[in-house]
Amino acid sequence: MSNLVSLSEQMGAMALIDELRFSQAELQKQLDLPKHRLRVAEQIREFYRAKGIEVEDALVEEGVRNFFANRLTYQAPVRIGRLARLLARAYITRRRWLMPTVGILGVGLWLVLVAPSVSGFFARSMVAGAQAQVDGARELLAGHVAQREQLEKRVSALYTDALVANMPTTRRLLEEAGPLLEKARTVEQVRLPLQVTEQSRTEDSKLINSATDSLKKDSIGLNALATQLDALSAQATTIRPWFTQLQDSRDKVRKMGLSKADAEQFQPLFAKAEQAVKDMNATAAEQGLQEVEQLRAVAAAPLTLEVVSRAGEKSMVERNFDPTGGKSWYLLAEALDASGNVVPLPITSVETGERRYASMFGVRVNQATYQAAKNDKLADGLVDDRLIGKKAANSLSFAFGKGPVKTKPDYILEW
């Protein structure tokens, strides 16, 4: 085992010894108090003498005696006032009340200093928003007025358009447009405020919202009218050439100098084409005009009406009516122009009422004419005397040289 003593042990023991020695010295002072007072008084006199201050010994003795007389005496504490106790308690309990109090004071300061500014900011923002609504409503109103005025001009122009104004579609649209445009003018009577204030903001907002809703709803009707007018304009653009052609065809037919009976054959065709134009039916209008032109071309050309005389084709037809025992006779004919080309003619069948253009058709003749043509064909397979009638230029009526039993003969389309 080592005989060395550690430094820490030595220092620890010395500290304890010093503490005991100091305590013993202090205790000795209290036990030998008179001697201790003499030593203190002597040191005080020496201190004053060193400083050159004259102090009476009696004064020094009295001071030292009074000091030691109260040194080990219990002195009751002086009673503190209610305010001091309250402040002391508040200080001791500060952790519980300090933070909530700071928060409450902060909210109070915010309400006093910041809240009015924030409230004013929001108020100004709401007024600005309402003013923006007014400006937007005013722009909407201006657009509505401009659209309504434009539509009124377009509708007015329809009345002066000779073609479009007489169309059933246009008349219906004009009848609907009048009340619609009148309603639009009524909607535009809204009075929008010039400047929104904080006091008028609520009422102004109600007025603006109501006016905006009315203008938007009415704009739907105006947009629908504009769409209809656009469609009408597009149809009119498409149909206008047919209207021009119809007018040209009328002029050409009139200039032909046709007889009343021949001119009347054009009237159903003109009426059909005109109705197609009014209905804006381009397909029907084109077909009607083609029929007018086809009939006009037939009327314009000089034609001869001849019996069909070709090998392998019939030249005549005999009808037998068994229930009555009656008979009728027809020569099969075709119309030829000056160059010998076959020209189809508009033929109405006396048997079925069908009317169509036919290159070959039957013309009713008397029995003698029929028998003569039959004998002619039996002789050599051809009909030599083929001519039945002629039609002059600018005419639809044939002059028959022989055979027909009527001035206006009967025709058939089937045999």
Image (tube, rainbow, N blue to C red):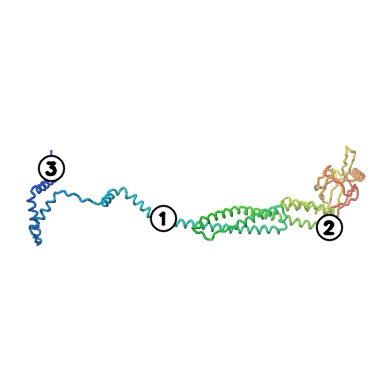
Q: Secondary structure at mark 2?
A: loop
Instruction: Indicate whether 252 appears above or below 21.
Output: below
**Residue with the most extreme top position:** 323
Query: What residue would you read off at disc 1?
Result: 115
**Residue 135 — which label?**
none
Left or right of 93 in this view: 107: right
- Of mark 2 and mark 3, the one earlier in the sequence is 3
Query: What residue would you read off at disc 2?
Result: 257
Q: Tell which tag, 3 or 1, sits nearer the viewer.
A: 1
Which three-letter amino acid code belongs to the residue tagged 2?
Gly
Mark 1 Cα shell of 10 Å, populated few (<14), some (14-19), many (≥20): some
* Residue 157 placement (x, y as % from top left): 68, 59
- Of mark 1 and mark 2, the one earlier in the sequence is 1
Which three-letter amino acid code belongs to the residue tagged 1?
Ala
Q: Secondary structure at mark 3?
A: loop
Left or right of 168 in this view: 68: left
Query: What residue would you read off at disc 3?
Result: 5
Is residue 387 visible in the rendered structure shown here?
no
Res. 317 image quadrant: top right
Mark 2 Cα shell of 10 Å, populated few (<14), some (14-19), many (≥20): few
